[in-house]
Amino acid sequence: MRIKTSIILLFLFSSTLFAKDSIESQADRLHQYAGIWVSSEHVNTDNIATFPAIKMNNISTMNRQSMQVEVLQYKNGKYTSFLTELIAHDAKSDKIIALGQNQEGVVFKGVGDFSSEKKWRMKDFDMLANFYLEVEFSFQTSTNVLLEGFDALGKSLWKTRYIKSNPKDKNIGIQLVSVHQEMLKDSKGTLKELGRMGYSYVETFVYDKGTFYGMSPTEFRNLVEANGMQFLGSMTFHDLPAAEDWESALMWWSNTIDDHVEAGVKYLTTSNNQLKSVTSKDELKRYSDYYNAIGKLCREKGITFAFHNHADEFNLVEGIRIYDYFLQNTHPKYVYFQADIYWMEMGGVKPVDYFKKYPNRFLSWHIKDYKELGASGKIDWMALFHHQDFDVPKYMVAEVEDYSYPPMYSVQLAWEYLYHTILD
């Protein structure tokens, strides 16, 4: 069991090793500034007040080449606009150009660029060509940026720290395998970033001997919740046991489920990397019986169990698709399904057909694409999310396995695509 399970872990975890470690272009660097930001209580802290002094809404436009910026100030119990800008990357000059107006009616134009992915400087002039302001943006992380204003002589005038604070009202989850290396290096910092990006809950992939990333169930749950999210889902594995090991395998599952109950998890999933070797319906029946037994244990302990697919489930065994057999031979009371949309497409089937035929069996979707979400154009996400014949399941989990950018940047793009493009 350990060897076979490690094959799955190695395959998925190794994908993050091939992610880019930097953001290359000026336009992509500028896009770091997209989102909703609020000022911290003080420039030297990232703590946020109940009513932050400043809010900034930066709306990405023109295929992430530009953004519309509105800056609002909290005064007399309400937020009022005191600065508006259009900031864009100019393809000809490879510069960042801004055109803005302040609350006094002064219009200004700014020109600048990123000297690195974390350092961005803009010099602004009014429409009479008089120096207006120079601003340096220093990205401490993808959700923490320090702004400093300078006069014409380079003297510092002010400093403000902004913290990203994207909304969570559309209940978007994230599979943490997408940022696996980051979680191993700095779980606390990574979860802080994900919470600020707008993710509402996490799904894990690393349960091991009663721990999550080396933390007890309660410790990990508390850390997730401290960063404004919930720990709702977990994927874990124990291969089909031999007949003589059946009871010990179910005991392992019973203890595993108890740990997840302690962590507050609502659903538990598993997948199977052994299906290529299956040649008979008798073998499929043993798997179905196994999943029924796990699902029954989960139900008794207050957790929902679901089976997660890859592509092998759509192979034929004695004339029937493995996935169809599981759907038809697992008990709907005990076994739900988590549809990995990408792997269904790779398996040569149409996800829509399954969602129409089995509308009550799908607890969750794993939402990922061939690269960053929505980038390939190969999956019609709008049709899936707005189909008249079935509802979107309760748990929508974004996942990135193949990267064009650093993982933290890629998962931010995934959230943005779901929040702004796909979901109502």
Image: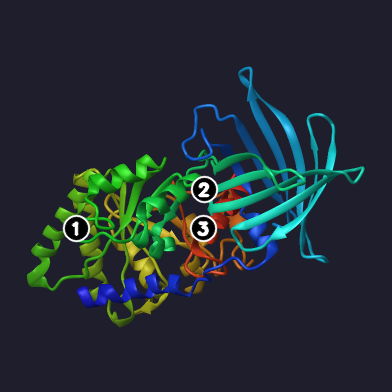
Query: Taking 189 as reference, is 272 left or right?
Result: left
Q: Is residue 83 above or below residue 115?
A: above
Disc 2 residue type?
A: Met
Nearer to me, 289 or 84: 84
Q: Quadrant of the C terminus?
A: top right
Disc 3 residue type?
A: Val
Name the residue at 50% across, 73% down: 346
Pointer 2 local density, CA inside 10 Å: few below 14, some 14–19, many at least 20 = many
**Distance of label 3 from label 1 (alpha carbons):** 35 Å
The quadrant in which residue 53 appears is top right
The quadrant in which residue 383 appears is bottom right
Mark in the foreground, 3 or 1: 3
Residue on which the image places disc 3: 411
Name the residue at 15% across, 54% down: 255
Numbered-mark total: 3
Query: Taking 277 as reference, is 84 left or right?
Result: right
Name the residue at 47% across, 73% down: 347
**Distance of label 2 from label 1 (alpha carbons):** 38 Å
Residue 377 at x, y = what percent?
Answer: 64, 66
- Secondary element type, mark 3: helix
**Distance of label 3 from label 2 (alpha carbons):** 9 Å
Residue 115 at x, y = what percent?
Answer: 66, 63
